[in-house]
Amino acid sequence: MKYQCPCGYIYDEEKEGVKFEDLPADYECPECGLGKDVFEPAE
Ligand SMILES: [Zn+2]
């Protein structure tokens, strides 16, 4: 499963080894700094 930030950054669960839902609530996009709540499921 992948999740995409509005800035275009994609969080790939397989690559990161951590499920998106298991990331801390204060996780921020490494590209733009927005929070988890703005990410949308991709694919
Ligand atoms: Zn972003």
Image (cartoon, rainbow, N blue to C red):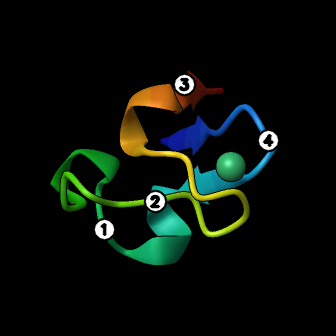
Q: Quadrant of the C terminus?
A: top right
The amino acid sitting under disc 3 is Glu
- The answer as to whether callout 4 falls within 8 Å of ligand 1 is yes
Local packing at callout 3 (Cα closer than 10 Å; few below 14, some 14-19, many 20+) is some
Q: Earlier in the sequence, mark 1 or mark 2?
A: 1
Reading the image, the residue beneath label 3 is 40
Reading the image, the residue beneath label 1 is 18
Pick the residue in front: 36 or 11: 36
Q: Secondary structure at mark 4?
A: loop
Q: Earlier in the sequence, mark 2 or mark 3?
A: 2
The amino acid sitting under disc 2 is Glu
Q: Residue at x 55, y 39 (%)?
A: 3
How far across and how far down the image is residue 35, in percent? 44, 45
The amino acid sitting under disc 4 is Cys
The amino acid sitting under disc 1 is Val
Pick the residue in front: 38 or 14: 38
Above/below status of 15 relative to 25: below
Q: Earlier in the sequence, mark 2 or mark 4?
A: 4
Reading the image, the residue beneath label 2 is 28
Nearer mark to the viewer, of 2 and 3: 2
Q: Secondary structure at mark 3?
A: strand
**Picture disc at residue 7:** 4
Q: Mark 1 touching mark 4, by CB under 8 A?
A: no
Pick the residue in front: 9 or 26: 26
Local packing at callout 2 (Cα closer than 10 Å; few below 14, some 14-19, many 20+) is some
Q: CA distance from mark 1 to mark 2?
A: 14 Å
- The answer as to whether callout 2 falls within 8 Å of ligand 1 is no
